[in-house]
Image: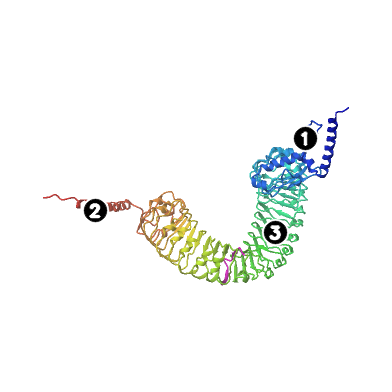
Amino acid sequence: MEPKFIKNLACGQILFIILWVLLTIFFPQIACFSNINSLTSTSHYQPTLEDLEAKALLKWKDSFENHSQALLSTWTRTTNPCKWEGIQCDKSKSISSINLANYELKGTLHTLNFTSFPNLLSLNIYNNLFYGTIPPQIGNMSKINVLNFSCNPLEGSIPKEMWKLRSLKGLDLSLCQLSGDIPTSIANLSNLSYLDISSNKNFSSGYIPHEIGKLNHLEYLSIAGCNRVGPIPQEIGMLTNVGVMDLSRNTLSGTIPQTFGNMTSLNELYLSNNTLSGTIPPSFWNMSYLSILFLNKNNLSGPIPPSVQNLVNLNILELNYNHFSGPIPSTIGNLTKLTNLDMIFNHFYGSIPTSIGNLINMSVLSLRENNLSGTIPAIIGNLTWLTVLEIAANKLHGSIPQSLYNFTNWESFVLDRNDFIGHLPPQICSGGFLLFFTVSNNHFTGPVPRSLKNCSSIKRLMLQGNKIEGDIAQDFGVYSSLDYIDLSDNKFYGHISSNWGKCPNLNNFMISNNNITGGIPLTLLQANKLGKLYLSSNHLTGKLPKELGYLKSLLEIKINNNKLSGNIPSEIGLLQNLIDFDVGGNMLRGTIPKEVVKLPLLRNLNLSKNKIEGRIPSDFSMSQPLESLDLSGNLLSGTIPTVLGELKQLQMLNLSSNNLSGTIPSSFDDDMSSLTYINISNNHLEGRLPNNQAFLKAPIESLTNNKGLCGNHTGLVLCTANHNQKSHKTLLLVLFVILGKAEWVNLSFIPKKDK
């Protein structure tokens, strides 16, 4: 007979088990996180895979910086990890995907236990702040399909264990700071369909491994900006499934492999910014699925053949910055899907083919910096989607076709450095999108296009070097985006409007060689980003505003050949970034402010043809980068400062037509090889010419009309001992006079003895 307490124990166990079953039915989470100890069992608790995965993720989170931990607020011990932010689980409730892209997390990968995730298929930490190296333990994730570590400051070499992840289909390590090399073992990733290791500029300089041709499942390949050198391997043509290939921004050399023609699935190809040379192989034009082709910024040469017409799906063709030559083939007009055609900076010649009028989807046409001739074909008016037309720096002539006058959606209209005539399209900015309007150095006449006055979108406006007429105060408005305007060498008149000071981004204001009158308005100086101010060769009057010195952004001031009067303000010396100061050819008076000659970055100083008097300041600095100094045609007196011969970068020195006297300082005898031009004529200088090539090879006209120069120069007398003796005698005479006076003073104070 069993004891009573044993019966009671059995009943208790039965009741407990019944209660536990009921609890797990209605509260299943208890079963996930509770540790059940059987009253009748002595075995230890074994944590589930879900427990291990949760523990590993929480440990990883705890290693993040505090701010980063707060971004993952759902990651707690009291919630199911399958419901955590960025986490996905499979049917067995094991974690299959970790997606933390764009979370701004900061931490390392070293605290993540990769062995805790045997069923992980995807790990995405794109665009965070993970730093440090990639741990070799990453090789333990045998089922992983996708790794995206892009846009993180990860460094160090790619661990060799990563190249053993044969299940990988997508690998993105772009835009990191990885170093080392791309190994031949990359061929182990035989299932890879997506590979992007671009923009890792710290990679060791090396070749693209030939073994890359074994990745025959690849559909996307980017090795751009990875410090690759040498030729493109022929084996790359074995990647017949690739749709996108980017090898740009390296230093790849040699020719484009003939095997490229085998990649008939290729849709986008980027080979730009390398040093590839030679002609494009004929097989290249067989890639009929190509929609985007970038060959720009290489050393490619030869003609573009008529077979370019085979690329019937081409949308974008970039051939710029190469050495292509020959005519533009008329068959290019068969590429009716083309939207962007860029052939700038090549050697194409001949006319613009009329077949270009067939490209009715074209929005960007860039043909500048070639040798094209003829006129703009009128049929270009068929390109009603055209927003960018760049045909500058060719040999084109004629007028702008009337068919373009009604276009209103221009963003860039660049026709400079040709021989165009006629008027400019009046509606050029009526659509309100125009950013760049550059028609300089042609023969355009007539008024400023009326739509320009209210063209609020304009950033760069270059009309210089034409015969355009108009009132500069009336034909232009206020431009919130304008940073560069050049109206020089035209027939503009009127005064400088206060509107220019209301252009908040104005950096370059150039209106030289027109018929502008009036003074320099203080309102102009409200444009506080002004860097270049060119007002030369006009009819400006009044004073040079001292307020110029408060525009700290000014780099260049050119107001020469006007009718300005008054003194040079010492406030100009506040412009510590000033490189060029040219106010020659005015009616300025007073002395040269020492604050101006002290400017530390000054390269060009021109105060010539004024009425400036006094001495040349000796406040120049040997460390100044001064290259050109022109003080000619003034009323300067005194001697030439010694420091001028110590300006090691000085190339041009003009002190002619002043009242300078004395000898030329011996400092010019020293190593001053930079000096190539001097003019000291029409002064009162005397003594020996310096032993300097700029002086010895100067034309005699640059030395004449002085008091008594001598030296080894045709047109000057040779120096004799008398010249040296004369200077010595002068010095001795001065000393005797000084000593004599001193002796007289001493004698006058000696007390006389009483008789």
Instruction: Identify the amino acid type marked 1.
Output: Gln
In space, the residues marked 2 and 1 are separated at their CA atoms by 114 Å
Disc 3 crowd rating (10 Å Cα; few below 14, some 14-19, many 20+) is many
Asked if residue 445 is among those painted magenta in the image, a careful observer would answer: no
Q: Position of residue 165 (x, y in %)?
A: 75, 40
Which residue matches tag 2? Answer: 741
Q: Mark 3 or 2 closer to N-term?
A: 3
Instruction: Identify the amino acid type marked 2.
Output: Lys
Which residue matches tag 3? Answer: 341
Foreground: disc 2 or disc 1: 1
Which residue matches tag 1? Answer: 46
* Mark 2 vs 1: CB contact within 8 A: no
Q: Mark 2 or 1 closer to N-term?
A: 1
Residue 374 visible, this orientation = yes
Foreground: disc 1 or disc 3: 1
| Lateral position of residue 613 relative to residue 269, left or right | left
Asked if residue 460 is among those painted magenta in the image, a careful observer would answer: yes
The magenta region covers 458-470
Q: Position of residue 505 (x, y in %)?
A: 57, 62
The quarter of the rendered structure image containing the N terminus is top right
Q: Looking at the picture, tell me which residue is in the foreground, 332 or 211.
A: 211
In space, the residues marked 1 and 3 are separated at their CA atoms by 67 Å
Q: Quick one: SS at disc 2?
A: helix
Q: Residue at x 38, y 51 (%)?
A: 666
